[in-house]
Image (tube, rainbow, N blue to C red):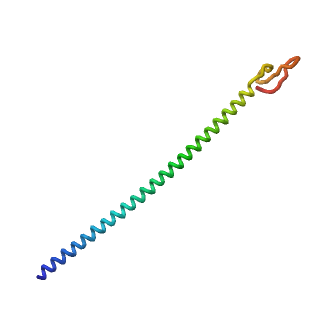
Amino acid sequence: MEKQTESVSIWTIAGGILLALVIWRAYNVWQYNRAVEQVNAMMVQSMEESKRSTAAARQQFIERQQRQQAAASQRKYEVEAAMTLRPDERCINKQRFRRVANGWEQVGSC
């Protein structure tokens, strides 16, 4: 009868060890999955922050381009306005002349 008791206790110990290993492995898998979920959440958050900062930078770039285009358009208008000659003016060798009673008077450059 002793052999049968020894045999049962060995199988009981082996079963207990196997059960402990299965539980330990399940716990490790659970920890791993939890860590993966945390990393994924951090990556999603990082990507969202990156998208927001990229969108903000893009908007700033567009606004800067619009300001530059508006300034260039204004300068072009000012230059064209300065270049427009009145009916009594002439541009000769990049010098602006205005008609006076007895000839021409130099009034600037064109």
Quadrant into which the N terminus falls: bottom left
**Residue placed farthest to the right in the image?**
102
Residue 88: quarter of image? top right
Residue at image coords 42%, 56%: 40
- In the depicted structure, whether residue 78 falls above or below residue 3: above
Residue 30: quarter of image? bottom left
**Residue placed farthest to the left in the image?**
1
Residue at image coords 52%, 49%: 52
- In the depicted structure, whether residue 18 falls above or below residue 67: below
Q: Judge from the rendering whether residue 2 lies leftward or rightward of residue 20; answer left or right.
A: left
Residue at image coords 82%, 21%: 98
Q: How many marks?
A: 0
**Residue placed farthest to the top in the image?**
102
Residue at image coords 69%, 33%: 74
Q: Judge from the rendering whether residue 63 lies leftward or rightward of residue 88; answer left or right.
A: left
In percent of width and height, residue 15 lies at 21, 72
In percent of width and height, residue 54 lies at 53, 47
Quadrant into which the C terminus falls: top right
Q: Judge from the rendering whether residue 67 lies leftward or rightward of residue 31; answer left or right.
A: right
Q: Judge from the rendering whether residue 18 lies leftward or rightward of residue 96; answer left or right.
A: left
In percent of width and height, residue 17 lies at 25, 72
- In the depicted structure, whether residue 108 falls above or below residue 18: above
